[in-house]
Amino acid sequence: MRLYTLIKEDFLNVKRNDPALHSSFELLFNYPGLWALFFHRHAHWLYNRGLRFLPRFISAIGQFLTTIDIHPAAQIGERVFIDHGVGVVIGETAIIGQDVVIYQQVTLGGVSLTSGKRHPTVEDNVVIGAGSKILGNITIGKNSKVGANSVVVKDVPPNSTAIGIPARVIKRGFDKNPLSHNKIPDINKEIFEYLVKRLAVLEHAVKTGDTLSMEKEDHELAEVYNTFIKAMD
C-alpha cells in the first residue's frame, strides 16, 4: 500500500471506530496515537530506503509531540489504532498486523541485546490492554487479547486471552467488542475463592464430623477447580 494511502486509512480508521470522535477537527488535537503513526509512517518509509539519521530524527519529533516512542524500523500494519497512547513504546524489530488496538502505557519490548528479531510479533485483530508489557521475540496470535497491566513473556495462541504477571493464557471465547475488558476473568480472584470455599468445607467437617457431606462438596469443588485449570495453558 502506498504511503499516503496508508496514512489516509489511519485517519479513516479513527473516524469509523472511535465513538468519542465528534468532528474531524478533533483529530488535530485529541489523538496522539494517530499522529504517532503519521510520523512513524514517514520515518519507516525512509528507513526502508537505507536512511538512518533522518528517520530517527522524525521519530524523535513524534515522540516529543505525542509521548509515544516507535522505532522507525518497526513494522506496523493497516488500521492500527493507538488509543490515548501516552507512554506506548514499540521496539525496533516489533511487527504489528492489521486492525490491532493498543492502549496507553503498552510496551512491545526486547529482552536481549543481541541483533536480530528480539521484539514481539502481534498478529491481526489483537487488543492490548493499558499498561501491558509484551517482551521478547514472542507471538500474540490472531484475535487475542492481552489484559491490562499484564506482562507477557510467552507466545499467546490465536483466539485467547492472556492476563496476569507473568501472563497466563485463558482459552475462552470473549465478546468481539475490543472494549469489553469487563469480561476478562480474574485468575487470582477465582483461585482465592476456591481456596476459601474449600477451607469452609473442611472447617464444617471438623466441627460436625460430617465426612460424607465433606467428601461430596469437596468433590464438586475439585471438579470446578479442574475445569478452570484446564482452561489455562
Image: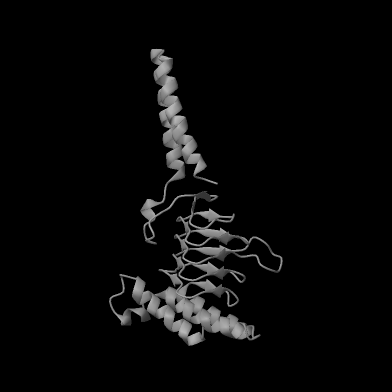
Rendered image quadrant of residue 206: top left
Residue at horizontal 53 percent and vertical 54 percent from the top: 151
| Foreground residue among 129 and 28 | 129
Rendered image quadrant of residue 193: top left
In the orientation shown, which residue stands out farthest toward the left?
A: 22
Residue at horizontal 39 percent and vertical 76 percent from the top: 13
> Residue 171: where, in percent of width, then height?
49, 49
Residue at horizontal 49 percent and vertical 63 percent from the top: 106
**Coloration mode:** one colour
Residue at horizontal 50 percent and vertical 40 percent from the top: 229
- Residue 59 visible: yes
The number of numbered badges drawn on the structure is: 0
> Residue 76: where, in percent of width, then height?
53, 74
Rendered image quadrant of residue 81: bottom left
> Residue 153: where, in percent of width, then height?
59, 55
- Residue 57 visible: no
> Residue 188: where, in percent of width, then height?
46, 42
In the orientation shown, which residue stands out farthest toward the top?
A: 209
